[in-house]
Image (tube, grey):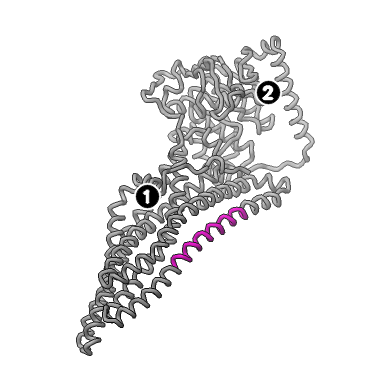
Amino acid sequence: MSSGTAQSSPRKSGGTFTALRRLYPYAKPAMPRIYLGMLAALLAGVVALLIPQVLKSLVDGPLQSGDSAQIWPAFAIVLALGILEAIMIALRRFFVLTPGTHIEARMRNALYMKLQNLPVGFHDRWPSGQLLSRAVSDLNLIRRWLSFGTVLLVVNVLTIVIGFVFLVNISWMLGVLFMVCSIPLWIYGYLFENKYSVVARRSQDQAGDLATTVEESVHGIRVLKAFGRGKHALQNFASQAEELRGTEIEKAKAIAGIWLWLLLVPDVTFALCLLAGVWLTANGQMTAGDLVAFFATATVLRWPVESIGFLLSMTFDTRTAADRFFEVMDSDDTVIDPVKPKTVANPQGRLVFDDVHFRYQDSPERVPDLIDGVDLAIEPGETMALVGLTGSGKSTLTALTTRLYDVTGGSITVDGVDVRDLTLLDLRTLLAMAFEDATLFSASVRENVLLGRPDASEAELAEALDIAQAAFVYDLPEGLDTRVGEEGLSLSGGQRQRLALARAVAAKPSVLVLDDPLSALDVDTEALVEAALRRILASTTALIVAHRPSTVMLADRVALLEGGKVTAVGRHSELLASSEHYRFVISSLEDEEKRESAERSSAPAHKTVETGLS
């Protein structure tokens, strides 16, 4: 199973404030309402702190003198302050809830766009579960912190400061005692950040790995069931889940530690202040109203002080989420549009490989290039078959044509223009690909086939389906509007390949690149597809990776790829006569085809009719 730990190791972001400050560009449009929410929350806190001052006047005034008539005005003031506090709290929620969802949507759209733009090499290295956890759980955490955590953290700290001023104003001796007793909280909070941030990061990475495992198991459920490996998959999942549980327990212990201090310190402080307050009152240095007001104010401050614990843990979780988000956003997008793009004015479809080299970025220097100096020219309207043994670089070479990867040496040109000088949109309009691993999307048949050219007519759609021998789609429950399900797994492998081929044909490219798109078809269906392909290949330049001798016969010429180099180019008959390695490759392809034919002939006599959906 994949793991994202190596790809997602935490970066040094320069501290919590620096990491969270990077969220500002996304939050900027919502900041006016967040500021209003902070103001409303702060006013609510100040109003709450005013109530003890009224109680002080009440105790030292009417309750001391026995004038009951003055109690009602004090009662009215307290009631009015309570209603005002409730209104301010309601306004705080009103101001901050909606902006947070907009920020989350803005960040998720930016992340999705970044993932679409990043090269295939990035996606080869990153497990999908890690990316999914960043796009969902991490951004959800950031949204909750911006809407709730940051507002309360700022407001509660200010409330504590203002409250201390009230306490000192009532009695400077008790106020100083209260502040001195609070110092351990700030020391432990600083130590808590260093410990908790590491554990929080590990937890979120492990959650991403667990999501990857679940995704792989769901996508590979047919394989797991076929080989009876469900129990093994469960054991692997349980092991990862147990590891995550242990990390979560470690997080919980860290949070429990700060809660111990947040609950213990205020209680000890209250006890010490009570002893000192009673002594000061008994000696006439404080009035009873002062004592009541002091403890009422301290009680109001208790919630802001206690909230610092979970607000800090939420802040550090958000810091980790922000780091993980920007790990993706900071990834280098190496396959980009040129600064000054060129265009192909009159596309003819001449595809030329000029001393093309390619190696992966992280490949050791001692490892030779996967593509090592390929020179090959495919003329307009010509069909070139690419053959070679497994690992010779055939699929890699085809991927370079549409810049799924960029060449690391040499150039690839279309009608004389380097593919790197074309915008990606123009390039992928000129060239279309069909892969051996046919991936479909959770959409209708029509949407999947017209993915590369949504404005194609019904006649062009029907023609593409006819060429790909995909008439089975008309027998699906809703015909062309039938949704094929996630990755098209409701269809057979051959059906998926035919739809993928129809998708490439429907795009009407100048150059058609086919990476063995017929491997899952039976011989009879393949023959029909090849016959139909000959019609469109007569006017379209094509580069075809061939794994069957019959596919080679489609081509005007054949290029032999050996160890990342083209060692021979010519007609099939010419290469059979001149190249021993070519004869060996073709012989290997024929043996493989015979083996597949023998397996089909030994299959049970009954035949299942494929409708594509059950």
Task: Give, as a single range, the part of the protein colored magenta.
Answer: 241-263
Residue density around tag 1, few if under 14, some if 14–19, many if 20 or more, within 10 Å: many
Which residue is depicted at the point 51% across and 38% down? Answer: 448
Task: State the image coordinates of residue 35 (x, y, percent, origin top left).
Answer: 29, 55
Name of the residue lying farthest toward the front? 283
Judge by depth and name the residue closer to the eye, 75 or 97: 75
Distance from disc 2 to disc 1, alpha carbons, whole Å, reads 51 Å
Label 1 amino acid? Ile
Judge by depth and name the residue closer to the eye, 220 or 167: 167
SS assignment at label 2: loop
Residue 379 in the image: above or below residue 467? above
Q: Is residue 536 visible?
A: yes
Label 2 amino acid? Leu
Q: Which residue was labeled with disc 1?
A: 103
Judge by depth and name the residue closer to the eye, 96 or 566: 96
Residue 51 vs residue 321: left or right? left
The rendered magenta stretch, by its main secondary structure, is classed as: helix
Q: Can residue 55 be seen in this view?
A: no
Q: Which residue was labeled with disc 2?
A: 389
Task: State the image coordinates of residue 552 (x, y, percent, origin top left).
Answer: 65, 20
Quadrant position of residue 113: top left
Residue 155 vs residue 348: left or right? left
Task: State the image coordinates of residue 161 (x, y, percent, origin top left).
Answer: 30, 62
Task: State the image coordinates of residue 181 (x, y, percent, origin top left).
Answer: 39, 66
SS assignment at label 1: helix
Residue 356 vs residue 178: left or right? right
- Say which quadrant the N terminus sits in: top right
Judge by depth and name the residue closer to the eye, 245 or 131: 245
Q: Earlier in the sequence, mark 2 or mark 1?
A: 1
Residue 512 in the image: above or below residue 112? above
